[in-house]
Amino acid sequence: MNEFSAASPALARDVATLRARIASWRGQGERIALVPTMGALHAGHVSLVREARKHAGRTVMSIFVNPTQFAPSEDLSAYPRTFEADAALFREAGGDLLFAPQPAVMYGEGFATRIEVGGPAAAGLEDRFRPTHFSGVATVVAKLLNQCRPDVAIFGEKDYQQLKVVTRMARDLDVETAIIGAPTIRDPDGLALSSRNVYLSPQERRQAPALHGALDQCAADLRAGEKLDVALDRASARVAAAGFVIDYIEARHAESLARVGALADGPVRLLAAARLGKTRLIDNIAV
Ligand SMILES: Nc1ncnc2c1ncn2[C@@H]1O[C@H](COP(=O)(O)OP(=O)(O)OP(=O)(O)O)[C@@H](O)[C@H]1O
Ligand SMILES: CC(C)(CO)[C@@H](O)C(=O)[O-]
Ligand code: BAL
């Protein structure tokens, strides 16, 4: 039998099936890790599964392209969907159960709840350009955590603000699951792996590593004693020269995401979002 066929316990399409499988593992004393994704898996997602397996005997991955975190103008319908390849990668990575619900399972008739996260973690970066995004993320992540009730949930640092928003939400709502961040996996030229990289034309793909290159140089300048605004201006000029339209390039406190005025206010994280043609890339690094 195909391990990932609809009949198999290795694939849950509804919450009852998910919970039954998790309950049987719990009965055997197993710890559970959850890796939430939107599918179109790459080596970054595989690294999250590896991290998950360090913390728990069983790893569940959710694959759900969550409509409520997309604005009407965004790429919900174009978002890459590669379920068969995802299932194969997940299995190779040693994952145990895929949870792949349809939107109607997640948002049943009459669904009327949204979680809004405030504070510095949710203010002034992605939210300026995607004002309804984190409410959609926080709501769906809260649902996934309730549905699965894992011991740990793993999120990539590639989406650094998302990691901080989810951490804030889990703390504020007394969620027992430990939220764990995992490092960004990059192509050899520095470009952060991202499902949306498939949107890049060959020419844009050649330009794209400049975003990470500029952040890297900015961090080096800061460590060498350069003033924050000077280093950030230089990074912006580099990114613009590479053909990007910049949404933001900012320095924030690495934990709270509060604004910082100097390296001494640190630990400092540099965060950026910029567009190459129709593709919007985000990236960040520690200073
Ligand atoms: N390069 C990467 N390294 C580590 N984790 C990553 C990487 N890319 C994505 N992730 C993490 O994988 C999880 C699922 O993300 P998602 O499915 O949206 O993939 P994505 O590549 O970030 O897609 P998108 O292009 O839509 O941003 C998130 O926690 C995200 O931070
Ligand atoms: C955390 C998440 C799975 C919520 O839909 C999504 O935002 C993502 O893939 O990063
Ligand atoms: N990885 C973040 C999901 C999103 O951009 O909607």
Image: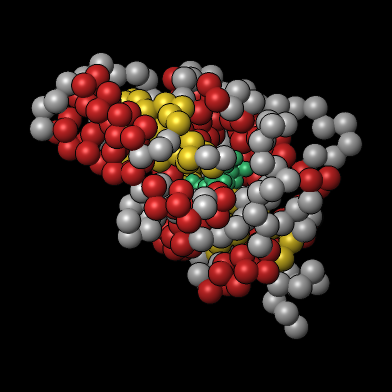
Task: Choose between 287 and 243: the one closer to the eye.
Answer: 243
Expressed as whole percent of the image width and height from the top left, the position of residue 253 reads: 32, 26
Expressed as whole percent of the image width and height from the top left, the position of residue 106 reads: 77, 44
Farthest residue, direction bottom: 1
Q: Quadrant of the C terminus?
A: top left
Question: Is 89 left, or right, of 272 in this rendering?
Answer: right
Q: Residue at x 80, y 39 (%)?
A: 107
Farthest residue, direction right: 109
Q: Residue at x 27, y 23 (%)?
A: 233
| Residue 258 can be seen in this image | yes
Q: Quadrant of the N terminus?
A: bottom right
Expressed as whole percent of the image width and height from the top left, the position of residue 94 reads: 52, 71
Q: How is the image coloured?
A: secondary structure
Task: Tell me: residue 1, above or below residue 20.
Answer: below
| Residue 264 can be seen in this image | no
Q: Residue at x 29, y 38 (%)?
A: 214
Quadrant of the image occupied by residue 246: top left
Task: Tell me: residue 20, above or below residue 212.
Answer: below
Quadrant of the image occupied by residue 141: top right
Question: Is 33 left, or right, of 111 in this rendering?
Answer: left
Task: Choose between 31 and 186: the one closer to the eye.
Answer: 186
